[in-house]
Image (spheres, rainbow, N blue to C red):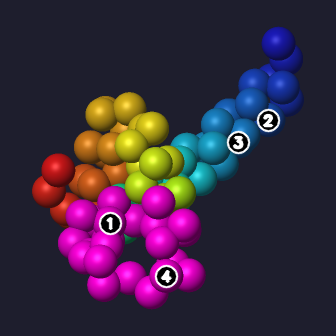
Amino acid sequence: MNKQEVELLSKEIELLMAERTRLLKVAGAAATLVANFDAAALPPQAVNAAEALSENLNSLSEETLRDALGSVSARS
């Protein structure tokens, strides 16, 4: 690899890490929301979205979910 390729790869990694940080914050906020809402109180039109959100959060690895909750200072 030449210097230009290394610099380009380094910048791409920095962008990906910044995006990961933003996505962890979103996932952490979503997990906190799901943990604190009463499903019975949801309007019927929101139930499918809440179920999809919950299923996707549950599909995260334990480490990723911990990182996500930590990014929003929540407790797992």
Mark 4: amino acid: Pro
Mark 3 neighbour class, 10 Å CA radius: few under 14, some 14 to 19, many 20 or more:
few
Kindly check if marks 3 and 2 are in contact, taking CB atoms under 8 A apart as contact.
yes
Question: Which quarter of the image is occupied by the N terminus?
Answer: top right
Mark 4 neighbour class, 10 Å CA radius: few under 14, some 14 to 19, many 20 or more:
few
Mark 1: amino acid: Val
Mark 3: amino acid: Lys
User: Measured from the top left, where is residue 9 in percent x and y?
Assistant: 74, 31
Picture disc at residue 8: 2
| Quadrant assignment, res 45 | bottom right
Q: Is residue 7 above or below residue 14?
A: above
| Magenta-colored stretch includes residue 54 | no
Picture disc at residue 46: none
**Circle 4: element type:** helix
Sequence-wise, the earlier of marks 1 and 2 is 2
Front disc: 1 or 2: 1
Write down the region rendered in magenta.
30-51
Sequence-wise, the earlier of marks 4 and 2 is 2
**Circle 3: element type:** helix
Residue at the location (84% across, 26% down)?
5
Kindly check if marks 4 and 2 are in contact, taking CB atoms under 8 A apart as contact.
no
Residue for badge 1: 34
Residue for badge 4: 44
